Amino acid sequence: MKDLIVIMGASKESGTMQQYCRQLKDADIDFHVEMIPLDHPNLHGGGSLGGKMVGCRKLVQEFQDYEKIIFSDAFDVLFYGSKEEVMSKIPDTYVLSAAEKNCYPEPNIAKFIPGKTPWRFFNGGLWAGTPENLIKWVDSIEQHTEYKSNMIDQQFFNWILAQKDNSFLHIDSNTELFFCLYSGYPELYFQQGVPCNAVCNTHPNFIHANGKWSNAEMLEKRRLSLENYI
């Protein structure tokens, strides 16, 4: 069995995608780019829940010979770390999804969602697990009473969080593996080029500029951390 693959969807190469792929290659992490037609609903409005679940099932079946799988956005993600770190952070018993500080697309339900950190809302840009758990996760979502295929995925998951029905939903609320940049700059710093969350004292590996958030400040912080180290 192979160890780890990152699967990303894209209609074309854009943003930080080229750098992201190079970073994964340098870390000896396999990756696959699934080309998405320009008229596909998952390119707009956060992505349809049904489309993402169908795509996830298909791709997990295609790459089931990997021990662990990460699904990722393509144009706004960067990676720092090692394959060994990532493998150790992907759970063996459930699927882990990225978390963010922004309750999209219905901020009015934010007050109903509990959490011990600011990262208590679902982000659909990154999720990870074993092939077996990913298939179970898709099954549980499609069988859920609130499931509607045309919903925005974040809308569905944040409603589930608000209802405290999270038996199958685990978000990375401590940013162990994933860090979403939206509204997150005060907490993010770098030690010798390694990303750190000052609030959670964690070292996330995948940095996601969700909401088209600029990563210029992040890259400058990292450059200065390396410059000062040298």
Image: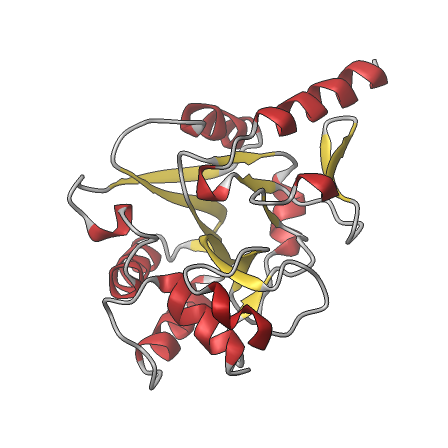
Q: Is residue 143 above or below residue 18?
A: below
Q: Residue 208: where, in percent of width, then height?
A: 53, 41
Q: Residue 134: where, in percent of width, then height?
A: 42, 66
Q: Quadrant of residue 85?
A: top right
Q: Note whether residue 168 is visible.
A: no
Viewer-nearest residue: 61 or 18: 18
Query: How is colour applied across the structure in the image?
Result: secondary structure
Picture residue at 75% right of the left edge, 35% below the top: 189
Residue 187 falls left or right of residue 32: right
Quadrant housing the C terminus: top right
Picture residue at 73% right of the left edge, 33% below the top: 194
The number of discs equals 0
Viewer-nearest residue: 126 or 152: 152
**Extreme residue toward the front, this view:** 108
Picture residue at 32% right of the left edge, 82% below the top: 143
Q: Residue 153: where, in percent of width, then height?
A: 36, 63
Picture residue at 72% right of the left edge, 68% below the top: 116
**Extreme residue toward the right, this view:** 229
Q: Is residue 190 above or below residue 182?
A: above
Q: Note whether residue 105 is visible.
A: yes
Q: Residue 71: where, in percent of width, then height?
A: 43, 51
Viewer-nearest residue: 64 or 113: 113
